[in-house]
Each structure stands twice: as C-alpha cells, then as structure tokens.
Image: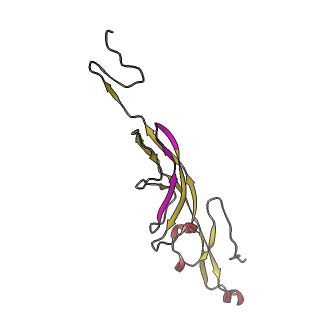
Amino acid sequence: SYIDLTKTCTHSTETFLGWATTSTITSPSQLISSKKIPTAAQIHNNTALETTTLYGIYTIPITVSATAQSKVYDGTSLDASESGNAKCTVTSGTLNSAHTLTCTSSGTITHAGTNTKTLGTVTIKDSGNNNVNSLYHITTANSTLTVTKRNTTCTSASDSKTYDGTPLTAAGG
C-alpha cells in the first residue's frame, strides 16, 4: 500500500503542514504522526530493505487570552491599550520556548463596574524576529476590565461616617 504524500488535512485544532524527516524538525511538539516510507528505488526494485521515516507536521494548537486588568476608582480610565500592561497570555497549549508573543487589546472603563477587554491582533515571532503565526492554530479569548469602588470617609466638625449615599446628620438635632 502507498501513502499519498501530497495529502493535506484540516482538523478542528490543527492543520497538516507537510512531511519532514527528523533532520528537518524544528519543533517536536508539532510531530503528531509518522510513517515509514520506502524509497523510490526500493519500490522500483520491489524491495523494502530500508525505509525512511517521515513525520507529519501539524500546527500547534494554543489559546491566547487577553489578560484581565483591575484597579480602584480614581477618576481616570482603565485603558486596555495602555503601555506596560500585559495584554495577553497563552492559557492553553505551549508556545515554543524560542518564540515570543505580543498582542493588541482594546477596551476602557472609568467608573466602578466591568467592561470587556477585547483581544485584537496576536503575533508570534521567532528569535530572528520572523512572524511564525502559521505554525500555530490560535484560538483567542477576551477578558475583563474591572474598576472597584473607592472607600471614602466624610468628616465634619462634630461627626464622621463612611460614605454610604445617605446624608450625615448631627446627633440630637
């Protein structure tokens, strides 16, 4: 029986990229299947003394999620695109150790509550700064921006209380 080496297939979490020999493998986590294939000369001579192992190389399935952000209300907005904020992380699967992940995200909130932090562009680069997104099957997930209420204490000349939305009244009058 012969194997069609030109066949490609797509599954829900991975895509067949092609065949390779062990000397051409760059990411062992991409190896999902292997087949021993006789050389053309062996097939022609009807001998099968030696075989070459070919490895099916597939995309690596990963999930990249926007990183949740929160802060206590201070009157300024919490902005998902501010510099210095971790925009995303790999939450399922494994990124090749020689690859780096960068993302864009959007969303903003100012007052106490929550809002969606939307994950935008996901870029994976190798050590040579080449885009290697095609080696991965990337699933993305949004996250949350949260602003919590700030505790406020009001003090008058004769009394004090923690703010609760009701007026401070003087005792006895």
Left or right: residue 129 versus residue 45 is left
Residue drawn at x 27%, y 18% is 158
How far from the left and from the top, in percent, is residue 74? 39, 39
Nearer the observer, 123 or 17: 123
How far from the left and from the top, in percent, is residue 106? 52, 51
Nearer the observer, 147 or 77: 77
Nearer the observer, 14 or 159: 159
Classify residue 60 by image quadrant.
Answer: bottom right
Classify residue 54 by image quadrant.
Answer: bottom right
How far from the left and from the top, in percent, is residue 168? 36, 19
Classify residue 30 by image quadrant.
Answer: bottom right
Residue drawn at x 44%, y 53% is 82
Q: Quadrant of the C terminus?
A: top left
- Magenta segment range? 94-115
Left or right: residue 9 versus residue 72 is right
How far from the left and from the top, in percent, is residue 31? 56, 69
Q: Give the colour scheme of this rendering.
A: secondary structure
Based on the picture, tell me whether residue 113 belongs to the magenta stretch. yes
Left or right: residue 59 versus residue 2 is left
Q: In which quarter of the image is the N terminus?
A: bottom right
Q: In this view, does 32 lie above or below 67?
A: below
The residue furthest left is 157
Q: In this view, does 135 lie above or below 24?
A: above
Left or right: residue 89 versus residue 53 is left
Nearer the observer, 119 or 49: 119
Residue drawn at x 51%, y 54% is 105
Based on the picture, tell me whether residue 147 belongs to the magenta stretch. no
